[in-house]
Image (spheres, rainbow, N blue to C red):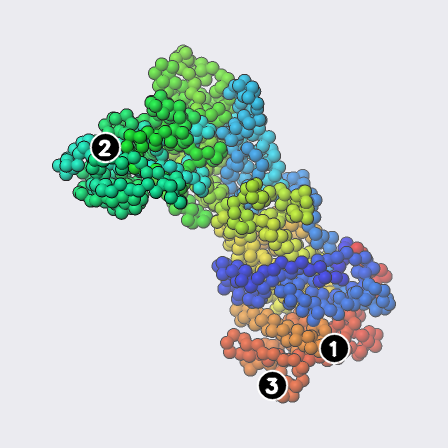
Amino acid sequence: MEVIPFIKPFCSRLPISLTTSQSQMAMQNSPYKVLLLRKYPSFRRTTSASLSCFGRRSSSQFLSLLNILNAKYYSTGSESESCVSVKKRSRGPVMAAKKNSEGLKQEDGKYKHTVDLPKTTFGMRANAVVREPEIQKLWDENQVFKKVVERNDGGSFILHDGPPYANGDLHIGHALNKILKDIINRYKLLQNYKVHYVPGWDCHGLPIELKVLQSLDEDARKELTPIKLRKKAAKFAIATVKAQMASFQRYGVWADWDHPYRTLDPEYEAAQIEVFGQMTLQGYIYRGRKPVHWSPSSRTALAEAELEYPEGHVSKSMYAIFNLVDAKKSHDLLEEFFPNLFVAIWTTTPWTIPANAAVAVNANLQYAVVEVQSSPADDSASPGNAKKKLGNVFKQQESLFLIVALDLIPTLEAKWGTKLVLKKTVMGSDLESSRYVHPIDSRECPIVIGGDYITTESGTGLVHTAPGHGQDDYVTGLKYGLPIRSPVDDDGKFTEEAGQFCGLDVLGNGNDAVIEYLDKNCSLVMVEPYKHKYPYDWRTKKPTIFRATEQWFASVEGFRQAAIAAISQVTWVPPQAEKRIISMTSSRSDWCISRQRTWGVPIPVFYHVETREPLMNEATINHIKSIFSQKGSDAWWYMTVEELLPNDYRHKASEYEKGTDTMDVWFDSGSSWAAVLEKRDGLSSPADVYLEGTDQHRGWFQSSLLTSVATKGRAPYSAVVTHGFVLDERGLKMSKSLGNVVDPITVIDGGKNQKETPAYGADVLRLWVSSVDYTGDVLIGPQILRQMSDIYRKLRGTLRFLLANLHDWKIDYAVPYNELPKIDQHALFQLQNVVKNIKDNYEHYQFFKIFQLIQRFVIVDLSNFYFDVAKDRLYVGGTTSCTRRTCQTVLAEHLLTIVKVIAPILPHLAEDVWQHLPFQYTTEDGQIAKYVFESRWPSNEERYLALPDEEVQYWDKILELRTEVNKVLEVARSGKLIGSSLEAKVFLHTADDSFSGKLTEACESSNDADTLPRIFITSQVEILPYLQNEQIEQASYTGEYLIGEKSKVWIGVSRAEGAKCERCWNFSPQVGSYNEHPSLCGRCYNVVASQPEPALAAAVS
């Protein structure tokens, strides 16, 4: 057994500063501000926290520490206050220990065997790199997670895991995500739930396929068949899953690691085909030609969730004009302007002009015919306009009339640098059915009425419409039966249909060629750079295009309202997430679910060789599902059409061929509720919670919602929790180029340079997760991690203090609540309040508030007051004395409670403490809890909360008064009147008769722990009934304290009366009164007289 060393507790203090502003901010952000200020008045004053470090000392040095009763080795005031505490309270015992260690006579320490020093083998240093894996091994070997789940009988709790992508190493965002989930699961375990958590991985898709292709040389790629590619992709994905799983386990995450779900597993693929089949049979799946996000760099269609919109994209925006040849409805109004009348359009995609089929106007907008009366000066060469170019259209000699939105005339005049004279106005509805000549192929095209997307915020108020290259254009095109032209191939190059532009890259030289052609033919007004958000392929980081292709779609329109209704039945954390997903669901187009890749689950469709009519019905889908459940989806590639078709169709096998499209990976993961929750024993849908990043509102949350609503009519989750992204300490996105990437494994195990990147362990990383408000973006970096490490170290020190002072404790020693001193009852009242608030925050997933509560109460409040005054009772009160046992009763309650409430966040620390408990813990149902998660959540002790308000208010005043007394004591110490606070006598006077009476009662209390000298850590306290010059002169140093807004308390300090007790260092007139022990006070005499002198000291290092 190790005796806790206290010889040099302050020399190596490593404070973590908590500024006043930070403290106030934490309080302002807490809904428990009023409660905390009322229950814990020290919150109002504490501005920083520090924790002493313990050095190593020999056993002979430990044996000399008989006078350490008041050593404040867990200082939690500000740094200056900590130093004050050392000098005014602990100087004597520390100096005594030092002298003893330097070899003073043995008789100087003759009462050492009567002092109960703290003892524990629980180390001050976590040694997390070694200790955490040991604890994880302990859990694994004893199947603690499994056993706790089996034993719990409080109902089922299912947190369904959103599958990370199996294509590389984990990053700090993964750590945030998985640790948040684990905190919830572990809390639910303590709440007696049967927690079901099956980890999952997304194993299909382009990123993995690209990883395989990048690993092969050109010759190997040429020989790569689809089935060979799939086998290599599967091997890569499985290896990645294994590596990621090991990292998650190192984070301390508990899960059913032996039975994860992987989207490449045959049973999963079969369940996915089943969901697809159900949607098909209900008419939600269809094949159509419509514009989709297309990635030329990946040569496949993309879902919205596969896009990103990086800052800084610049397009070439263009103003162009098309010659109007027929006005239809407004012929009489516009006749005078022919043949020099044009419609002016604006576009950021000039390359789509070859596919133009119409110009759309807003029926409710007012349009104007304007005459161009002055040619603009070409200012393209002027500074800042190097890329701005005016077209040749203004160089024409004849009159030029343009149709633009009336409200945009001033804007266009300024932009084009010309004078536009208003000639006539016309409503947009009157322009419908007018016709213009296409500027490239001379086709006549109509003017049509578009939707609300046509505004006067930008452009000209008239929209170039190419149904093959835009969603709004496509909808308008369907309304008017416009041709859906898309003369662009899979590589993003113009096809032969584009005529002279064939073979050109639409995002490069093809775009330039169209602009040049229009300018040459006097259709270009101006071209200029335009910075805006533009969709990029999230994998290749290259721009995408909108392109009409033959694809398979899920008709969201068919169940959109049902999906929105289902969203309202879900609890969203934070609440604003509900609005976000409703907005995305209500505005999204039909879901393109087909991909032109090899590595994925195939769409189970056969095409007639001649007519290209698809064959896909209940019989064919069920047959494919049956095959996949046994052989996996590879069977689609190596089995023949005849083998893949059910018996009734095999005679027609020669007439069909297999489709080559695979499903969108979001359909893969979006089917996990069916493949996991509805297929595995003990699980069910809907899950209690889904928890992922905020980007999943358009990803997994939405794809899961759509597949579930389409087939089950409800959401697959009861609650959804979302978290933000992780940024560096400056709020910047992490990137290797900036050198600001924080690797979670490096945080845990340390880097190559341990001084720059020390090993903090998983619990420090988990503590960081609990400290941030994850509902927004969160910050992490070296400084933040150091702060977390300091807080962790202080918390560990607090728990070590508790363990060490319970080394001789047994549950049988517990003192009944009604027999506890008032100070102990108040301590339990505070504890129960904190537990109640922590539980409420766990229930509402507000972990950062738990972090604040633990930091304030456990690290600061307990150490500042209760532990500080408890040391006298614990060390010199007498081993079996009532005052020590009552204190140990409270400490045991605090230890067990604190360990349980921090266990979900800091499981390794909690288990480490639990394995060092000096006593056995038995649960309410009589079972021995060998591990902390077998102990259950702390029971609700209403009797602790039943402390009368009058008593609560009394202790609030006492704590505030204690702070003021300490200030006067410090002045007295500075004036050399006293050294230690035990050398002082305190005088108090107040005109408040009620409070004065309570103070007098406290001084005369029969329970030593409740007396004011023990609370103030002074030798004597005297309450003066009145204040006269004689009393004022008796006090060398004085001060005043205002209680509330009315009552004042006068405080005086003088030297203590009597001599110093050799054992407890309190001053007392009784010292010298006992012949057998002339150097002891009355209390110490009674303790020593009842304790036999041992033959050999028991404390060893």
Per the model, the C-alpha gap separating discs 1 and 2 is: 110 Å
Per the model, the C-alpha gap separating discs 3 and 2 is: 103 Å
**Label pair 3/2, CB-CB below 8 angstroms:** no
Other residues around mark 2 within 10 Å, as few (<14) / some (14–19) / many (≥20): many
* For discs 1 and 2, the disc positioned in front in the rendered view: 2
SS of the residue under disc 3 = loop
Residue at coordinates 57% horizontally, 45% vertically from top-left? 740
Relative vertical location of residue 577 with respect to residue 202 in this rendering, above or below = below
Indicate which disc residue 1027 carries: 3
Other residues around mark 1 within 10 Å, as few (<14) / some (14–19) / many (≥20): some
Q: Nearer the viewer, residue 56 or 1093?
A: 56
Q: Which residue is mark 1?
A: 1068
SS of the residue under disc 2 = strand
**Label pair 1/2, CB-CB below 8 angstroms:** no
Other residues around mark 3 within 10 Å, as few (<14) / some (14–19) / many (≥20): few
Residue at coordinates 40% horizontally, 45% vertically from top-left? 383
Q: The disc labelled 3 sits on which kind of residue?
A: Leu
Residue 80 sits in quarter: bottom right
Residue at coordinates 25% horizontally, 38% vertically from top-left? 361
Indicate which disc residue 323 carries: 2
Q: Is residue 580 visible?
A: yes
> What quarter of the picture does the N terminus occupy?
bottom right
Residue at coordinates 13% horizontally, 36% vertically from top-left? 332
* For discs 3 and 2, the disc positioned in front in the rendered view: 2
Q: Nearer the viewer, residue 769 or 948?
A: 769
Q: Is residue 680 visible?
A: no
> What quarter of the picture does the C terminus occupy?
bottom right
